[in-house]
Every structure is written in structure tokens, then in C-alpha cells.
Amino acid sequence: MSHLIAPSILSADFANMQAECEMINRSEADWFHVDVMDGMFVPNITFGMPVIKAFKKHAQKPFDVHLMIEKPERYISDFKQAGADILTVHYEASTHLHRTVQNIHSEGMKAGVALNPHTNIQLLDDIIADLDLVLIMSVNPGFGGQKFIENSYRKIAELKNLIIQRNSKALIEVDGGVNSDNAPKLVEAGADVLVAGSFIFKSQNPEETISRLKNF
Ligand code: DX5
Ligand code: ZN
């Protein structure tokens, strides 16, 4: 499988979301990456269900919803109704993670778990077989446009080993500071899905930038 590209709409122009969604529809992107922040788990607030529902009206590709919120288990069916296809919660934010993952599946969504830069891969040992996706944060969550953390390559390789060892089908997604310099190295290390926000939306031609991230 060739790697997937998930533009993070956090860096898009919120005043022109219809045009931004249509650009992603036209492009070689595979998913929409949708960042939800609550001002508690991370020091920033983005948007919630009504806004996701509005984006969804214009979007023709799966919604990869990244919840940076405390106790995400409170809102699983709400995010399903808002249009999430893949729902990712943070390891650090959900005490009963196994139950949360089961509930995401019973709502008919793919389930992902995200790890902060300081969280060890081996903590997933007992849940990896149940996951569809693991999101490795390659910056501290909360903001777009931060610098990529180099230790992420080592984490991707370690996660790849764990996935093989436990016979898991989980995809490895990398989020934060992704650009055309590090993208080939990330895929080589084992990444299946690349999220990119500012690198795409702050570029001259976002559609072409998506194509550059997809084809190398
Ligand atoms: C950060 C978010 C990311 C963010 C990435 O907490 O999870 O998805 O939009 O933005 P860039 O690609 O600019 O680092
Ligand atoms: Zn994200």
C-alpha cells in the first residue's frame, strides 16, 4: 500500500471552508484530518460537532478525527453523528481505553489511539491488536506549525515491530511538523499515514503540495 495523506484542516482558511474542502476533494489527499481541542487536554480550543458537520457537507473523503480532549469517551456517538469515520483518542486522556476502543467500534468507526511525544510505545502492548490506527505525535499537541521532534523516527520503528509481533492491522499515522523533507524518511521508517497542516495550507499551491507529499 502506498502511504496516505491526511491534510489537517486546522491550518485551512476557516472563512472559506467550502473552497478548502473542495480543494482537498480534487487533490490526491486520502483523508481529512480534523483536530478537536478542548482547552483542557491541550492549551488550545478549536471546534466541535456542529462545525465538523458543516465541513462534512462539502467533503468527499473519510474524516479522520483526532480528539485532543479529556475523557473522550463522553462524546463517541456525537462524533459519529457529526461525520467521523476514524476516531482517535489520546492514550493519556482515557482511563478505560479498552472500553473506549470497543465503543468506537460498536458505533461503526475505525478506532485510533494517539501518543504524546513522551509516551512509550510499549504501553500499547495490550491494546495494539484491537486498534485500526496509532497516531504518533511528532510535536506536542495543541498547535500547528511546530518543529518536528526527531525521536519520532525511533518511535515509528518500535511501533512497527510491536504491530508485527502482535499481528495487528493498525496503520501508523504521524502528526506534527511533517514536510517534504521528512516525509520520505517517515515512510521509510514505517509510517502509513502522513498528516500535514501548515506545510500544505501555508504553501503557494496547496493542491500541488499534497501531490508532492503523496508522490516521491
Ligand atoms: C497538532 C495537531 C496537528 C496539526 C499539525 O496538535 O494534531 O494535526 O494540525 O500541524 P502541522 O502540520 O502544521 O504541524
Ligand atoms: Zn492532529
Image (tube, rainbow, N blue to C red):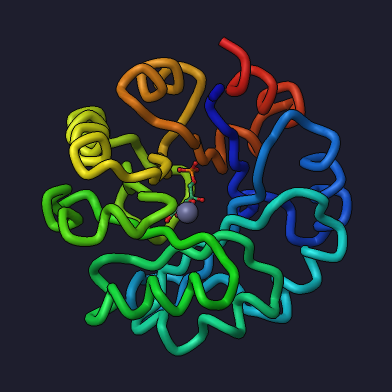
- Image spot of residue 207 (x, y percent): 76, 29
- Image spot of residue 101 (x, y percent): 38, 71
- Which quadrant does the C terminus fall into? top right
Q: Which of the 4 image quadrants contains residue 57?
A: bottom right
Furthest residue to the front?
167
Residue sitting nearer the eye, 106 or 180: 106
- Image spot of residue 173 (x, y percent): 42, 42
- Which quadrant does the N terminus fall into? top right
> Residue drawn 17% across and 34% down?
158
- Image spot of residue 30 (x, y percent): 67, 38
| Residue 167 higher or lower than 214, as above or below | below
Furthest residue to the top?
216
Residue sitting nearer the eye, 136 or 18: 136
> Residue drawn 59% across and 70% down?
108
Residue sitting nearer the eye, 34 or 159: 159
Image side of residue 11 versus residue 162, left or right: right
Image side of residue 120 versus residue 111, left or right: left
User: What is the number of callouts on the image?
Assistant: 0
> Residue drawn 74% across and 53% down?
13
Image side of residue 7 versus residue 17, left or right: left
| Residue 210 higher or lower than 169, as above or below | above
